[in-house]
Image (tube, rainbow, N blue to C red):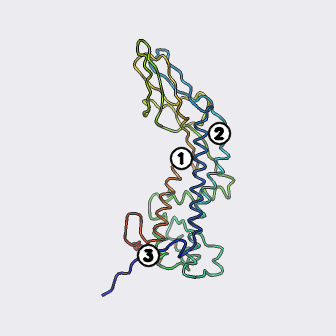
Amino acid sequence: MIEAVAPRILRPGEDYSLWPNMKWARARQLTSELFHSVNVQSASSRAGLDVEISDDKLSATFLVREAASMPTHEWSLLFADVIHNYRAALDALAWEMAHLDGKRPRPQDETRIYFPICTSKTQWEKQAKGPLSSVPSDILRRLYSVQPFHAEPVEQGILVSLHRLDIADKHKGQVEASVSVRERATTHSSFRLEEGHSNTVHESRPPEEWLSDGSPLRPGQPVFRINTGSPIAWAESHMPLPLKLTVELEGREIEIFSLIDTLEKQFAAVFQVVNSGSFPGQPGLVVDHEPYR
């Protein structure tokens, strides 16, 4: 009778160095800096909302008061640093796996080791038989299982996007962030009605009419409108300007913080697979695929 062999568990800091986790943590730290900077700019007094009450006084339109100068170059640099550290975390992980158990890659492979992000099995085979040939077979199967070519659409996979953004910044000048008004944000407004309706009404809700079309931020740009059905005497909004930070990748506009959130989830899955042999929520070994034939 053959006994089942328990999956090998790798422990960062014991079986291999903490450097991959440290680079991942650095990416999260830089993300926090970027998020904080955008939030401060969003809440700044110069970047609030003006209001225009309609001629019939039954609606109020809120507009960008003044498009304060946005530090897009600083945000682009921060975002690029976030991307570089995510990519470096994966590459450091691959380096550690190639040196696991005291193994040494072939001399010609030492400078060619990086985390494979393969869009085809052919690409994977070149890596597995080349720079990653010193990786233990069970760990190689784990690396194989998280490759982008297992899911469709391959070209829009999150790790593929990470790789291409990293290459774009390193070899094509810069990754440039752009700013627009976020779409369909929850609004906060206050208004008072005429003709005996003297109480001030405070609202926090999704708007009935969201007017932003995603175009670049500009003074006087309509953001949202409220409709009351009764004449409005006064209205205002102190909500921060709902900013959206985006980057363009091969003709696609991608929201930066949504991209980073997806990256975080993917990284948690990749590191768990490599360390434990199982996907999040799935206790079994990743043995569904052979690394190569």
Q: Residue furthest bottom?
A: 1
Nearer to us of marks 1 and 3 is 1
C-beta proximity under 8 Å, tags 1 and 2: no
Mark 1 and mark 3 lie on one chain; the one further toward the N terminus is: 1
Count residues near mark 1 (Cα–Cα under 10 Å), then give few for <14, some for 14-19, many for 20+: some
Instruction: Give the quadrant of residue 17.
Output: bottom right
Query: In the figure, 139 relative to 215: above or below?
Result: below
Query: How far across and down, in percent of the image, does residue 232 sit?
Result: 46, 17
Circle 1 SS class: strand
Q: Disc 1 marks which amino acid?
A: Glu
Circle 3: element type? loop
Where in the figure is residue 32, as x and y percent of width and height? 57, 51
Q: Which residue is mark 3?
A: 290
Residue at the far right in the pictured view: 173
Q: CA distance from mark 2 to mark 3?
A: 50 Å
Q: Residues within 10 Å of mark 2 (few under 14, many from 20)?
A: some
Taking 56 as reference, is 111 left or right? right
Residue that appears at 55% across and 28% down: 63
Q: Amino acid at mark 2?
A: Met
Residue 240 to residue 11: above or below: above
Q: Is residue 42 above or below residue 18?
A: above
Q: Residue at x 57, y 44 (%)?
A: 245
